[in-house]
Amino acid sequence: HLIAERLPTEIKEDLCRATFRDLVVGGKQITVALINALMERYFGDTNLTDALCARLREICPNLYGAADLKTTKANELLQSAKHQTNKTEQNLMLQKSLELYKQVTVNIDLSGICNQYASVCFYEGIVELCLATAESQDNQNLALHLTHTGEDQGEQLLVARRHCYLPVTNTLNNLLAMSQGASGVQN
């Protein structure tokens, strides 16, 4: 119960509706979310998370692979950075988390990570991660070219890229709203 309460609402709903067969046959998204929630539960205790990572890689390598390990390490760095009072150390942790996330852009919750980066004012991380994720979705940079030729794949790639850029535009809109609110209060 402690683990499931950490899941996003959509995953919780899927988990409630899923049968055992659903989980075994096609429930990788739910299973991965449960593993991530388990890891989040023990963030801060590096020895325990390292032991959990090793054990998961040993007993279920198809569900917890090298990319998952990098994601876990990046998540742990991000959580630690949020509580770090030394700005130099915090920036170092954020940069390390960014480098790890950029290596596994397919396996991340882009919006959630960007929201956490925004909470510590790591705006360059938001932009870099969104650009890296967009590039991984369309590594040959075909979206614009194929869209102009009218191909469906071009439209799909363009939509995927727009989705990757959404956290950047959301952050900019939030900053604009905050600055307008602050200037309205001062007047």
Image (spheres, grey):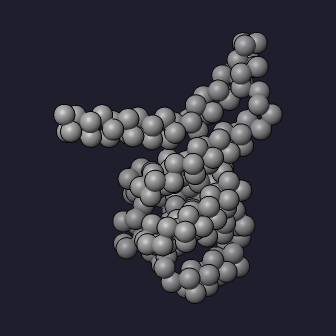
Look at 58% across and 51% down and name the residue there: 125
**Residue 147, x across and y down, in percent:** 70, 17
**Residue 85, x across and y down, in percent:** 43, 72
Viewer-proximal residue among 13 and 75: 75
**Residue 65, x across and y down, in percent:** 70, 67
Judge whether 144 appears above or below 174 on screen. above
**Which residue extends farthest front?**
187
**Which residue extends farthest bottom?**
47
Q: Is residue 171 left or right of residue 88?
A: left
Viewer-proximal residue among 1 and 155: 155
**Residue 18, x across and y down, in percent:** 46, 56
**Which residue extends farthest top?**
149
- Asked whether the viewer can see residue 36, the reply is no
- The quadrant in which the N terminus is found is bottom left
Look at 71% across and 56% down and name the residue there: 103
Answer with the quarter of the image where residue 24 lies.
Answer: bottom right
- Asked whether the viewer can see residue 2, the reply is yes
Answer with the quarter of the image where residue 29 lies.
Answer: bottom right
Give the tally of numbered discs: 0
- The quadrant in which the C terminus is found is top left
Look at 36% across and 65% down and name the residue there: 5
Look at 63% across and 33% down and name the residue there: 161
